[in-house]
Image (cartoon, rainbow, N blue to C red):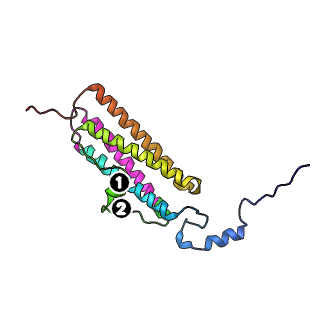
Amino acid sequence: MATESKSTPFLSDIETIRRRAREHMQRGAVTDSYTLDRQTVLKLLNEALATELVCVLRYKAHHYLASGINAKSVAAEFLEHANEEQGHADLIAERITQLDGKPDFSPDGLSTRSHAEFVVPEELAAMIEENLVAERIAIDSYREIINYVGDRDTTTKRMLEGILAMEEEHAEDMKTLMEDFGKKGEPAKPVSSR
């Protein structure tokens, strides 16, 4: 004999959905079905925003300060990454506002909110290394945030997965630059005679 299983409806009835949609309309996209602690998510996203902003500033500084035989092509890579990091910051800021939060662009405390550091060495090889370290920090940070939000906030998860994929590309770019730089054996900056 086949047993009958109780089936639960996939969705609430349409009247319930309509009624809930009219409640708390000032919260925009944040409905009662959002089950994560929104304040925690906003804090994590604002830290990610700060991380991206610090990365933009670091890559820009490295772009303008790069010197040496290999500087032109490496500086171009730094600028490309700075622009992509700015795009990440814009996506994150937009998601924060969708979750009824405020993106924190304040320069006060930016470096303490960021997971990555703002380090500007004088030598080109060291700049490449610092950018690789920062990308690896971002990769681990995004993976942890993605694991935290899981399927309870699929929009944030998808956005962060896209950013994570690009951060992994950036890390590979920096790794390749480091390897190529080492093969050429050229100094990042001419050594002054003493």
115 or 17: nearer the viewer: 115
| 34 sits left or right of 125 in the view | right
Q: Quadrant of the C terminus?
A: top left
* Amino acid identity at mark 2: Phe
x, y percentage for residue 80? Answer: 35, 43
Residue at point 46%, 48% (across, down): 163
| 13 sits left or right of 34 in the view | right
The furthest residue to the right: 1
Q: Secondary structure at mark 2?
A: loop
Give residue 136's quadrant in the image: top left
Whether residue 63 is situated above or below residue 14 in the rendered picture: above
Residue at point 36%, 48% (across, down): 83
Residue at point 33%, 42% (across, down): 131
Q: Secondary structure at mark 1?
A: helix
162 or 131: nearer the viewer: 131
x, y percentage for residue 107? Answer: 30, 61
Q: Which residue is mark 2?
A: 105
Q: CA distance from mark 1 to mark 2?
A: 8 Å
Q: Are marks 1 and 2 in contact (CB under 8 Å)?
A: yes
Question: Which span is picked out in magenta?
Answer: 65-94
Secondary structure character of the magenta stretch overall: helix
Residue at point 75%, 60% (across, down): 9
Whether residue 104 is situated above or below residue 142 in the rendered picture: below
x, y percentage for residue 78? Answer: 32, 42
Q: Which residue is mark 1?
A: 53
